[in-house]
């Protein structure tokens, strides 16, 4: 059962998928329609999931489930992963990037390989105040308050 993302409660569980490239405006609009269709049909053991999905800003796909309504199970989570893999094929991109860190440069989301972080810090590309995306947030509340944070307050603090 699709619920607008803005109406999802803070405790709703989230999964954040980072794309390996920015989506165009038309891709983003089309992808959000695919996401809405999937979420509207997403179930757990034939029961509706109260869920939502959104593309933020042009680089991240976020799925959310209010598990107070019905809990996502292994099968429903597997279905979402298969759907995300279908999105990858359709848009010719990777949404399972785990070896790159995303950060803001002005209003643009950039990425850098984890292995290059120290060099990026030494060169001043990433500073203590650079906004870093923490894709390991667990719920909507954390997404809203901790997903974007200054590098100095994240695990990257050891580089400063």
Image (tube, rainbow, N blue to C red):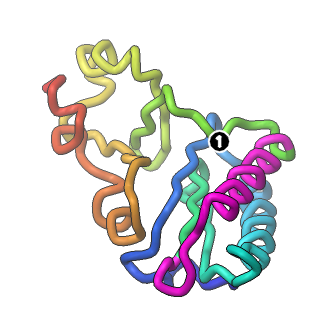
The percent position of residue 130, horizontal first and vertical second, equals 28, 40
**Residue at position x 39%, y 60% in the image:** 138
Q: How many marks?
A: 1
The percent position of residue 89, horizontal first and vertical second, equals 84, 41
Residue 67: within the magenta? Answer: yes
**Secondary structure mostly seen in the magenta stretch:** helix
Horizontal placement of 85 versus 112: left or right?
right
**Residue at position x 69%, y 83% in the image:** 48
**Residue at position x 80%, y 65% in the image:** 34
Which residue is more in the foreground, 3 or 113?
A: 3
Q: Quadrant of residue 50?
A: bottom right
Q: Residues within 10 Å of mark 1 (few under 14, many from 20)?
A: many
Mark 1 highlights which residue? Answer: 95
Indicate the quadrant containing the N terminus: top left, top right, bottom left or bottom right: bottom right
Asked if 10 appears above or below 147 in the picture, the reply is below
The percent position of residue 142, horizontal first and vertical second, equals 33, 64
Highlighted range, magenta: 66-89
Horizontal placement of 52 versus 145: left or right?
right
**Residue at position x 74%, y 58% in the image:** 79
Residue 130: within the magenta? Answer: no
Horizontal placement of 118 versus 17: left or right?
left
Which residue is more in the foreground, 83 or 26?
A: 83
The percent position of residue 44, horizontal first and vertical second, equals 68, 74
Badge 1 element:
loop
Toward the front, the furthest residue is: 45
Indicate the quadrant containing the C terminus: top left, top right, bottom left or bottom right: top left
Horizontal placement of 78 versus 6: left or right?
right
Q: Quadrant of residue 152?
A: top left
Which residue is more in the foreground, 124 or 11?
A: 11
């Amino acid at each position: 059962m699709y619920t607008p993302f803005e109406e999802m409660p803070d405790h709703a569980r989230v999964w954040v998928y980072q794309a390996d490239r920015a989506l165009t405006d038309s891709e983003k609009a089309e992808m959000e329609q695919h996401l809405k269709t999937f979420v509207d049909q997403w179930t757990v053991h034939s029961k509706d999931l109260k869920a939502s999905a959104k593309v933020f800003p042009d680089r991240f796909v976020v799925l959310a489930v209010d598990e107070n309504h019905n809990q996502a199970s292994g099968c429903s989570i597997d279905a979402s992963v298969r759907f995300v893999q279908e999105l990858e094929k359709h848009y010719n991109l990777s949404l399972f990037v785990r070896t790159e860190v995303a950060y803001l440069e002005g209003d643009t989301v950039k990425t850098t390989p984890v292995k290059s972080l120290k060099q990026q810090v030494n060169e001043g590309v990433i500073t203590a105040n650079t906004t870093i995306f923490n894709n390991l947030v667990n719920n909507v509340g954390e997404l809203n308050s901790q997903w974007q944070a200054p590098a100095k307050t994240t695990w990257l603090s050891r580089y400063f």
